[in-house]
Amino acid sequence: MTALLKHSALSGVYRMNGAKTTTVAGWEIAESFGDTSREQRQLAEGAVLVDWSHIGKLALSRGDAAAVAEQAIPGAAKAAVLGTTGNQDQVALRLTENDYQLLCQPGQEQALLEKMDQAKSTVTDSTGALACFALGGPRRDEVLERSTAVDLRRDKVVPGSVIQLTIHTIHCTLYRTENLEIITHSRTLSESLYDGLMDVGVGVGLMPAGLGTIPVSFEEEK
């Protein structure tokens, strides 16, 4: 029996903008919005927004969440609160002393779940319930400045940090790397967040881009 294809909450945006899609781990996701070369130029010079809603997303809370997170991603238990640890394929975000969000390459969430003793913590697979954007480019800070009241200057929120905040009135978790802002949020509000970011990003030339421009990777640049 053929598995049903999973769709991003931005499927309507894809259609309206003539996106070329690809299938990754059972998800239909945007590969490009018609001109990958243009998207890559904008990534180098301005800002782009990429839909990563197909990545794996797990939530851990209560019990001994640190020990359970450690089973999935070594080093997670030693991460500071609002700190992170991981590699290019998976990362643990420590939101509080006893709350984590784990992000992974599409399709890897089941393997992580199987590593964890779920009797010791509340573990939730939120892959379908949460969406995710990757915001990249040298002018991405300007987009965020116009999108939230939270001070996200780089001396305040350094690469490798995670912060929970409101962006365009929508609760989000933002994981900062050297080159990207990785933003998870409710799937039901994904199109509203997309519209808000694109509206304020007009002045810096923010444009939608696909996986051909920013493929999924959680590895921080050294």
Image (cartoon, helix red, strand yellow):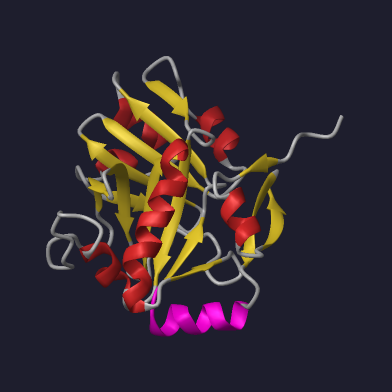
Residue 78: quarter of image: top left
Residue 170 versus residue 213 in the image, above or below: above
- Which secondary structure type mostly characterizes the magenta part of the structure? helix
> Which residue does the image show at 29% across and 20% down from the upper left?
62
Residue with the most extreme top position: 119
Residue 202 shown left or right of residue 3 in the figure: left
Which region shows up in magenta?
A: 36-47
| Residue under the image location 38 percent in, 34 percent down | 69
Left or right of 3 in this view: 218: left
> Is 45 in the magenta?
yes
Q: Is residue 15 visible?
A: yes
Position of residue 159 measured from the top left corner of the image (x, y, whole percent)? 26, 63
In the rendered structure, the answer to whether residue 132 lies left or right of residue 155 reads right
The residue at the point 26 percent across, 70 percent down is 141
Q: Is residue 190 left or right of residue 166?
A: right
Q: Is residue 159 above or below residue 124?
A: below
Quarter of the image that includes the N terminus: top right
Residue 10 at x, y percent in the picture = 55, 50
